[in-house]
Image (tube, helix red, strand yellow):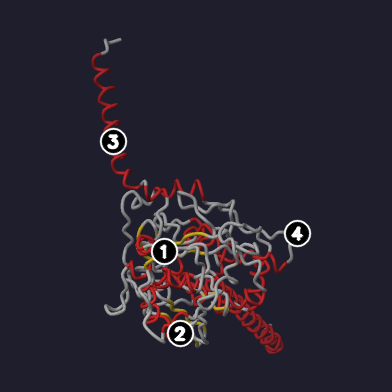
Amino acid sequence: MPKLLPALSPIFLCLTALAATSGLALAEDTNSASSDLIARGRYLATAADCAACHTAPHGGTPFAGGYGIDTPLGKIFSTNITPSKADGIGNYSEEEFARAVRDGVAKDGSHLYPAMPYTAYAKITDEDMKALYAYFMNEVKADDHKPQQTELPFPFSIRTSMAVWNMLFLDKTRFEPNPAKSAEWNHGAYLAEALEHCGTCHTPRNGFMAEDGSLPLAGGAIGPWFAPNITSDKVAGIGGWSDADLVQYLKTGNVPGKAQAAGPMAEAVENSLQHLPDEDLKAIVTYLRDVPASASGDEQSRADLGKPSTEIEASLRGLPGQEPNENGFHIFSGSCASCHQPEGQGNLHYPSLFKNTATAAHRADNLIATVLYGVHRTVGDNVAFMPAFGPDASYTDRLSDEDIADVSNYVLTNYGNPVVKVSAADVALVREGGEKPLIVRLAPLAAPAAIAGGVFVVGLISWLLIRRRRSPAS
């Protein structure tokens, strides 16, 4: 028997080598599959614009939280979603991660506020949730940063109340392709409805701050800004835009003679949309083209309204007269005309003030907010910048509510929609975060109602106990 060993040795060596080669190939296949999954997750996190809200401004660590989101309820601070085991999601299982993203419930059972758009992310498929989890757990750098805690006033501070809100308004249906539509349409629908969560901003909300499903993408207020109608309506929506215009806007946030992104839309362009391939942007456009037209909003096309003005140039020949809008004239000529040009035509770096969606809209929210908060949008190597003249401005540049109303009216009258008028009260409302929904206006009544309810319950229990004691023994 020992004599057979030399003869079997070559066979044994071949089998060993084959097994090793097979094991190596299997390991390589596994690593490749894992890399593909992580790459898919990276793409999905970009499309979902996670970095915009979960990265603190001015050099914050990516995804370490701390970004303050202004809402009608108060300021909500984003959480750390790095794989830190101390302050992030490092201890989350895949199931717990999916529950937080799609259901708005954290590992400890606490409810998230829908400033985190889980109402849209609920449509994300199981396969994509697996990829997102792989990306955040394996490629995102862990950071033990502990963001500022969100402290909303009563009754919004009671997070368990979100369980009732979710029962009423959270649709947990996952995205299902529409077999009657093209592959491009379905891809665009998935991007727009789930990942890019367009409806979170562009769909109007009811008194309880839930999206109004009867008016999808018909325009909605988001704090001090107003996300315009992006349905297929040719006047109030984007039906009159060319496909090239829409793709350019999504990719750069700027279409000369039409619109420029500011506020939350600038963040979406900077952190998400500019990084998507053109095929994705074209798919989103294909989907938007098919959204039922809604005539809510503007009665004239914002991209066609307005004209240049020669008032500034004419005034150079002498001082302007004592007109009611003289203050607006002086502010515009001193702070605006050097960039936007005397006739309002703009240049390669600054947009035109006529045929502009901010100055020609049926409401002045975005014009006011732009003056208050400025614009900062980085696309590639190009930086679009306008200084803020509101709360973050330097002392010499800060404008009062009356000043901003005056310069807004000057711009609207001379370059935009002259029908729209701005008062100092309008500016104050935008400065305070915009019009409050019904649920916020009723909030001051919550505490007295809770006290009254408690007194009633205690009184009822006391009455029942007294009545029981007085009743004859049976």
Q: Which residue is mark 3?
A: 452
In three-dimensional space, the C-alpha distance between marks 1 and 3, rounded to whole angstroms, equals 41 Å
Q: Who comes first in sequence, dot 1 or dot 3?
A: 1
Q: Residue at x 36, y 46 (%)?
A: 442
Q: Which residue is mark 4?
A: 180
Mark 1 burial class by Cα count in 10 Å: few <14, some 14-19, many 20+: many
Query: In this orientation, which residue lies closer to the viewer: 135 or 21?
Result: 135
Q: Residue at x 62, y 82 (%)?
A: 24
Which x, y percent locates residue 225? 45, 65
Pointer 3 and pointer 2: residues touching (CB < 8 Å)? no
Q: Who comes first in sequence, dot 3 or dot 4?
A: 4
Q: Which residue is mark 2?
A: 313
Q: Is residue 82 visible?
A: no
- Is 142 situated above or below 119? below
Q: Residue at x 32, y 73 (%)?
A: 399
In three-dimensional space, the C-alpha distance between marks 3 and 2, rounded to whole angstroms, equals 65 Å
Secondary element at tag 3:
helix
Callout 4 amino acid: Ala
Mark 2 burial class by Cα count in 10 Å: few <14, some 14-19, many 20+: few
Which x, y percent locates residue 132? 53, 69
* Viewer-side label of 1, 3: 1
Q: Which residue is mark 1?
A: 422
* Viewer-side label of 3, 2: 2
In the rendered view, does 30 fall on the left or right side of 471? right
Query: In this orientation, which residue lies closer to the viewer: 98 or 448?
Result: 448
In three-dimensional space, the C-alpha distance between marks 3 and 4, rounded to whole angstroms, equals 55 Å
Mark 3 burial class by Cα count in 10 Å: few <14, some 14-19, many 20+: few
Which x, y percent locates residue 35? 57, 78
- Is 134 situated above or below 210? below
Callout 2 amino acid: Glu
